[in-house]
Amino acid sequence: MRVSSSHFWAWGWLAAPLLAVGTSGVAVAEADADQPATEDAAAAVELAEDDDEDAMKKESGIIRPTHKQTLIINVNTGDLPQTTLTSFCLSPEGNILAACGNEKGEVRIFDAGGAYLESWELPVKPDAINIGSDGNVYIAGNGKLLRLDTEGKVLLEAESPHAAELLKNEEALRKEIVDQAKQISEQFAQQIEVFDKQIAQLEKKKAEKEEEGEELSAADQARLKSYADMKKQYEDIIEQYGGKEMSDQELAEKVKASMDYKLKVASISETDGKVYIACTAAVGYGFNVWQLDDKFTGGKVVVSELRGCCGQMDVQASKDGIFVAENARHRVACFNDDGKLTTQWGEQARSGIDGFGSCCNPMNVAFGADGSIYTAESESGRVKRFSPKGELIDLVGKVEIVPGCKKVAIAVDKTGDTVFMLDVSRNHIVKMERLAAGETVAYYEQRGEGGSSVGRAILKAFLGN
């Protein structure tokens, strides 16, 4: 089956959560988000003992990490009510500000050692949180933008510009949903025809074998069952998402669901009085970066048509530019205030440290105090550090997280000695600390192993670039 790029991106909001589509076109299951976490985080890292062996590996291109996992910080600790962790950031003092929310929104604050300090109630359920260059806390949620002081007091609240854009494009969105449902139906109907022919051929072969007193081979029996199962799966998809004309009520429900999905803000960032948010386009399947002033006014799109998976698009702004973890293109991209691309680096790679692994990475970026760029990969839990120009500086390390296509926000303290990563599936934050002098760990990466040419070809077929 050939899946067009428009279908691939549309499913994120039209059919989500339907299924993850692998490069072969066959549905694949997400990782179990409920699998238990390792109790002793530090035990997940083995200390290497053979210094001579380590030296040999280093000479052959081995890169050792600079940090190791040491602590898990659960936001549902003690007697606190159960909540859902959506994102986090670090305060200038090094405290963890965890953005949480189910029915109501709040920020739960922990010190760097994981001890709970206090909570701030929010007027919105937060999608994204960040610390600005002014020391204030910036939050986005429910189509709103908030600025809070260091005590949790709301200083400013305003409607996000992309929310107004959505309302203006409701009719175009309605048409897009109808057209998309038709395209899904036509695409899967064509594949069902192929399955029908394959099934008919095997059924004919089976009948001929039975006339001769023989059975169909085990391999052909497996193919027959596989074709029948896949046909049934595709028929169910057509029935659910495009097999019949939608009633006005069904269409209204899909429009609302799509608008709710598009209303979410993937990330928020502030620097030098300018605020940046990343969110899905009002119409279409890409992501836009909006720039606003310090009053949350004058909103304009400065970057558009970014490609992201599963609603994730991390944008962080600094004096060096607007850095984007454009996960579906396997790159970090830097833009200036006018939206001009100034720097980019990265490629898809099955192995090795030089590229980004899995279907969609890097998922998140963060800044070190020295201006270096940290990247996080959601499938492996790997963190790397680059210069603002894209030169690899360090392999920071790797943490134990539930793999999958999801946000893995990271934050770095002022010294660079401590790095935190979000594990959204388990509602906790993983802490990494710099290795002591002379200390090494068993985990390492290899340089010089480039990306998969097959993987890059498939990606280009999907993205058209």
Image (spheres, rainbow, N blue to C red):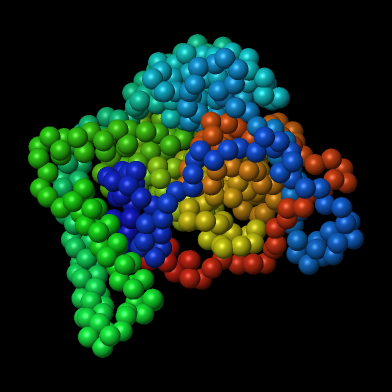
> Is residue 285 among the parts visible in the rendering?
no
Q: Residue at x 57, y 14 (%)?
A: 79
Q: Is 90 in front, or is 115?
A: 115
Q: Residue at x 88, y 46 (%)?
A: 438
Q: Position of residue 382 (x, y in %)?
A: 62, 48
Q: Residue furthest bottom?
A: 212
Q: Is residue 351 above or below residue 78?
A: below
- Indicate the quadrant where residue 247 lies: top left
Q: Quadrant of the N terminus?
A: bottom left
Q: Residue at x 30, y 62 (%)?
A: 230
Q: Is 162 in front, or is 259?
A: 259
Q: Is 390 in front, or is 53?
A: 53
**Number of marks in picture:** 0
Q: Position of residue 22 (x, y in %)?
A: 41, 59
Q: Residue at x 48, y 70 (%)?
A: 454
> Is residue 170 among the parts visible in the rendering?
yes
Q: Is residue 150 above or below residue 159?
A: above
- Indicate the quadrant where residue 257 lies: top left
- In the image, taking residue 215 as reference, residue 395 lies left or right, namely right
- Indicate the quadrant where residue 217 lies: bottom left
- In the image, taking residue 133 as reference, residue 393 lies left or right, namely right
Q: Is residue 51 above or below residue 202?
A: above
Q: Position of residue 80 (x, y in %)?
A: 54, 16
Q: Quadrant of the C terminus?
A: bottom left
Q: Position of residue 180 (x, y in %)?
A: 21, 51
